[in-house]
Image: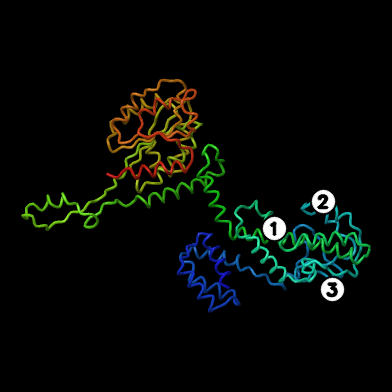
Amino acid sequence: MERTLTNFIQALRNAEVRISTAETLDAVSVVERVGYRDRAFLKRSLSLVLPKTKEEKETFDTCFDQFFRFEDVKSQSGRGEGSDGEDGEESQGDGAGGAGGERDGLPQQQAGKKSKGKAKGKPRDRDLLADEEAEEDLGPGEMAQATSTLGKLLMANSRVELSVAMANAGEAVDVREIQVFTQKGLFARRMMDEMGLGELNREIADLKEAPQVPSRRLGQELGRRRDWLREEVRDYVERQFLLHADASGKRLREELLRKVKLSNVEHRSFRLIQEIVYKMAKRLATMHSRRKKVFKRGQLNLPRTLRNNMAYDGAIFDLHWKSVKVDRPRVFAICDVSGSVANYARFMLMFLYSLEEVMPKVRSFAFSSDLAEVTELFERNNIEDAISKVLRDYSGGSTDYGQALKDFKRNCLDDVDNRTTIIILGDARNNYGENHQEILKEMYDRAKRVIWLNPESKNAWNVGDSVMRTYGAYCHQVDECNSLMHLERVVGNLLKQQST
């Protein structure tokens, strides 16, 4: 009982429902009192102690329905084998027990010829289909008794026993560890092997070669039921994937996208990357949003205390404490938006503007040749629309860093002071034009920090028309930055370094 509940709570946590240890103990107490007999009552009882918010309650309902999915055996009796989704056969005539149709949702022996729809089913295994098409028509009649463990289970016509066997096999192969959908076939195969597929295959092969008609008839029937079971196991693995690996699979994709080069990201992944950017920004904002200025607690500031109490003839009346103040940074972001680095600029701007709580003074500039300030564009539009307009309006033309630096000097160099951090994002490929590094030196002398982020790998710097060495001499920090992980590290360090 406790193991079932523990697995269910693990599935809830995997679906991002926050459950503490105390709440887990409360859930154990609830289950001890209500048991598993009444499914609806159990669901209502656990919903009182596990989910807390409206969103978590919706997630709880979905997870509970998937995890405690008990299929009514009687409801399966009307399901034809066509619901398997592949065979399209109608179970007519007498089965092993002489009853027509299905019993407990299991396919029964067919009467007469095979349905012509058999060959039109979805191809699972060409060799398997070829073998079945070559089978002789033995018709209904007496069948031998199965000897393999799985064969006996299949011929017993008990959906409940098969469901228990599948659950036990899933537990044995740790099907809950599935992370990506492409592992579905692997875990299905492992489960079939755990249930005794090898022994069953050998029995079917021997029966098909047997001289007795009842034995060959049993071989054909076991082959059909084996195929049906294979699909049932695949469906079981797929449900386990949706229950246990949906959220973890998303986290795995997010982790990969954090590390992959942004230039290699497909356009269809942009939406997920935006979500990752917002999560990163929220985490950094939580860490740095409060101004860490501490009064009346902490470490005593002895010099200031003595100085402010001199009027009292050495008596200490007014205590002063050491305080730490984190100033909000004033950031100038200069982004090369030419085709080769457009995606990097897209997500850096998104990152900076998602940190408006702790980085409210961001002025943004975009260029490929002429530099233009786009700060007001972000104030009038949402982030995504503003970035799209920036890339559309300023990404054309031949890259000219020298001209961009001249434009920056003319328009806003006077606004740069010792509280300003300048972030330049670009590959420093100047198309063999004038560098005007003297302007960058002026920016270096005025600003608190000048940070250059180059999306190219370091072994490509200073190759061809790259002037990274020239510009790097007038920067406080030069970093390779071509992934979200790099970008998060740079911005996190920027916020930390604002301590004064």
Q: Are marks 1 and 2 in contact (CB under 8 Å)?
A: no
Image depth: mark 3 or mark 1 in front: 1
Count of numbered labels shown in the rendering: 3
* Residue 86, position as x, y percentages in the image: 77, 57
Question: Which residue shows up at 90% across the image and 61% down it?
Answer: 113
Q: Which mark is residue 127?
A: 2
For the C terminus, the quadrant is top left
* Residue 181, position as x, y percentages in the image: 63, 53
Q: Give the structural element (helix, strand or loop) at label 3.
A: loop
Name the residue carrying label 1. Answer: 190
Name the residue carrying label 3. Answer: 97
To which quarter of the image does residue 99 belong? bottom right
Q: Residues within 10 Å of mark 1 (few under 14, many from 20)?
A: some
Tell me how far mark 2 sits from mark 3, CA to CA: 30 Å
Query: Identity of the amino acid at label 1?
Result: Arg
Query: Identity of the amino acid at label 3?
Result: Gly
If you read the primary sequence from the N terminus, does the residue marked by circle 3 or circle 1 appear first?
3
Task: Identify whether 250 is placed above or below 384.
Answer: below
If you read the primary sequence from the N terminus, does the residue marked by circle 2 or circle 3 appear first?
3
Query: Identity of the amino acid at label 2?
Result: Asp
Q: Residues within 10 Å of mark 2 (few under 14, many from 20)?
A: few
If you read the primary sequence from the N terminus, does the residue marked by circle 1 or circle 2 appear first?
2
